[in-house]
Amino acid sequence: MAQTKERKRAPSTTWRTASQPDLSPILAGALDAFYDDGYHGTSVRDIARRANLTVPALYYHHANKEAILYALLDSSINRVIENCELALSDAGTDQVQRFLNLVECQVLYLANNTKSAAMDAEIRSLSSENRRAYSERRRVIEYMLQRTIEGGVGAGSFNVSNPSATSRALLGMIQAIATWFRADGELSVQALARQYLEIAAQTVGASSRVLELARQPAARR
């Protein structure tokens, strides 16, 4: 019997759409309220009004305002991790492409979801238990990036002495996008991603070949 060739899995570029998780009316209203007025400037009554609910009805779904904030943070970080895993999978074992995909993935998500990304600044309002749980999820992304940098160093494509510190510096730079980027500004999301890819490649001491690759549009990489 003739053997059939195994089909190669087509790359899943859905991570480039960087869509926001589906939010309930309560969470959607809370996101807008927290973004407009800050966590401490928003009351449960404000959130209920935006969701067209009574306060008792809101409490049926969420124990308190902090629980709503945590639910927003949790849904966002889970989507980022999911997208990052897809981006790494698309790159296969190519260490350079894994790094570029991971950086691009995070830049696209933050630029397309600035409201959700801005909630990261509100983690100081969480209880120590919730803050610790969220930080553990966020470190998953940090470890992903650290491993791609270590892989690039091992392949001779990057030149950096401390992949751990470098990954933290890059993530801080990327997170800051939420504080200044506007979708209706002069810079497109795609152009922003290319700029950050080049900056990220320079930060890890990438070779000239990698720098040139980082400057290319996504379709040509």
Image (spheres, rainbow, N blue to C red):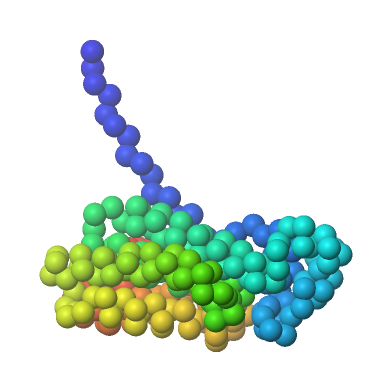
112 lies left or right of 56 = left
Residue at 77% across / 78% down in the picture? 43
- Residue 19 in the image: state x and y as whole percent: 57, 61
Q: Quadrant of residue 203?
A: bottom left
Does residue 142 lie above or below 184 as drawn?
Answer: above
Residue at 14% across / 66% down in the picture? 154
- Residue 149 in the image: state x and y as whole percent: 24, 70
Q: Quadrant of residue 146?
A: bottom left
Does residue 198 lie above or below 63 as drawn?
Answer: below
Residue nearest the viewer, comparing 18 with 175: 175
Q: Is residue 5 visible?
A: yes
Does residue 182 lie above or below 9 as drawn?
Answer: below
Q: Residue furthest top?
A: 1
Q: Is residue 108 visible?
A: no
Q: Quadrant of residue 160?
A: bottom left
Image quadrant containing the N terminus? top left
8 lies left or right of 192 = left
- Residue 65 in the image: state x and y as whole percent: 70, 71
26 lies left or right of 128 = right
